[in-house]
Amino acid sequence: MILLPWHLFLLAAVTGGSLSLGFKLFKRLGASLDDPMAFAASLALGFALCGYSVLALGQAGMLSPATLWVIVGLLIAVTLTERRIIAQLWQKAAFGGLSRPGKFLMGLAAFLLVFNAYRPETYFDALVYHLGLPQIFLLEGNTVPTARHAFTPMPLLEEMILTLGLGTGGEPVAKMLAGLLGLIAPLALYAWGRSLNKPKAGELATLLFLTAPIIFRNMTRSLVEPTLAGYLILALHALLRTPVNNAGLFLAGLFTGLMFAFKYFAGVWCATIFLLLCWRLFKENRALMSRGLALFFLGALIPALPWLLRNWAALGDPLYPYLSAFLGRHPNPEGWAHFLWEARHWHPGPRFISDFMIILKGSFADFSGAYFIGPGFLLVLPFAVKTCRRSNIHQALGVWTLGNWILGLAQTHYLRYLSPLLAPAAFLGALGFHDADKKIKRWLKPAIALVLAYHAFWMLHGFRRSLDQKAAVGLVSKKDYLQKKLGYEEALEWINHHVPADGRVLLLGETRAYGFHRRLVVATVHDRHPLADWIAQAANEQALRQTLKAEGITHIFHHRTEEQRIAGYRTMPLDEAGERRWRSFKESFLAETYADANVTIYEVR
């Protein structure tokens, strides 16, 4: 916490520079300062440019804190030289028009997101993916994907942005950037309401979405879904605004392609947005059909192409692992099949009935936080239906949202994946409430206030008085807290202090890369661990030793308790001969250098 001013300065520099660069691009597409969406769209485009600059460095093998500081230095220079434009964008965003409750909830969210940046990170997905992958990229000095780690080939634009924060300001700045990316959606919802001369409707949609526990809690965990919601709203707004024009269609394609750049799952929404575009052009401007589709495709291809080329060059599959799995060439078909099964069977019961019950339950209380949507959406749902009856545009947006909910539930039981769809649902409901009869609004305003207060309570619930709060402000040792929570912090520190800087560590039984400051060989629970292949391919123990030496592996980090927890994933499938060879190798060529109740560390002799 003592470095808070420095971290906030870095955050302001990256944000200000991104905002200015994004506005330059937004302006070239026919927009102006008077566009209510200018602030949110500029921020989204600017952050994307930062992410692609990090990706370019990584693909060139030039990724390091020094080169990342060059990017930050350029952003600082842009912030200083374009400070007048930044001030005008802030002024035009009209945040002063928010009501007092709105300002309070937005301020509370901002405060909690900053405070969250100093809490010791223990969330599994963050340690494996959202902070773990940037850690791997920084250690390796590149972002080249590998089949050894199932998630390195995926579109990782958010992780590129977090790499910029992690490599310069450390974990707090990375987590603040993740929170700021999640705020793009609320900003865009407010701006969409203003563009319709209904700022109060935009504000209500903003507050309903931002305070939904499934959204806010995922923002504090550095997850990508809140970020996806922002680019989704920007794409839908560009596509549905009136009149239809070339710049709007290109911009819609650009934001659609950026959704794909953040996550493969967004490819479903990219396809349905294309269908929505076809419907609108067919209904309103058939003469623009061919040119409009071409502009949309061009806009979508620009941000998607770097990820496709990256995978094609490294793995021979631009959509890895989907084409490889379809053609029967996946390196670990069992792991891939288990990944698909897990996504589709996250909770038991008949699929749609189970999903419906989970949504209802999650609208009021779900202490896991995984499916907790909040009662606000049930309250405004009738108004969303009313809004859809007002015009063809709103009807199309409602059908698109409902259709994607149904399509999404048919693909996955991770309701977190579908949470960005709460943004258009909140917007439709808020519009309907805004246009409702005055008597109805008079009766329902107290209910809306209670709902938002209930949501705010659950925002605070995640920050209730606990050890991680005390660790954030230094009242409890961060090391002791992490050791108690994760079970391997002391062993991790031993690695960081005793393994030579040029050493390489093989993680066995452990999938969480974040926190290690040495180069790693690490596999996820959906991968076949490379050690299993090396053991199977080795003729004897000496050959296995030569393989490890050729890979540069100097130490093996064996997390025994975690290995037992994930044993069902079978990441190390060894036959009887392989088991014997591995035991013999351990006796002959591994020297135990550290051991505690959970972890054993070996040095390869």
Image: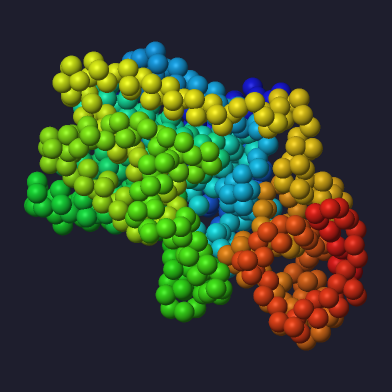
Q: Quadrant of residue 46?
A: top left
Horizontally, residue 595 falls left or right of residue 449, namely right
Q: Residue 461 at x, y = what percent?
A: 55, 29
Residue 257 lies, with reference to residue 438, above or below; the image says below
Front residue of this view, candidates 363 and 197: 363
Q: Residue at x 20, y 20 (%)?
A: 440
Residue nearest the observer in this picture, 130 or 300 = 130
Q: Residue furthest top?
A: 100
Give the image location of residue 157, x and y in percent: 49, 49
**Coloured how?**
rainbow
Residue at 18 percent of width and 45 percent of height: 396
Nearer-the-camera pick, 463 or 379: 379
The residue at the point 72 percent across, 46 percent down is 486
Q: Residue furthest bottom?
A: 539
Query: How many marks on residues?
Result: 0
Residue 560 visible here:
yes
* Whether residue 298 is visible: no
Image quadrant of residue 117? top right
**Relative image position of residue 147 (x, y in whole percent):** 58, 68
Quadrant where the N terminus is found in the figure: top right
Percent across and percent down for residue 43 are 42, 34
Classify residue 418 as left or right of residue 174. Answer: left
**Who's the residue at 50% across and 29% down the image?**
458
Q: Quadrant of the C terminus?
A: bottom right
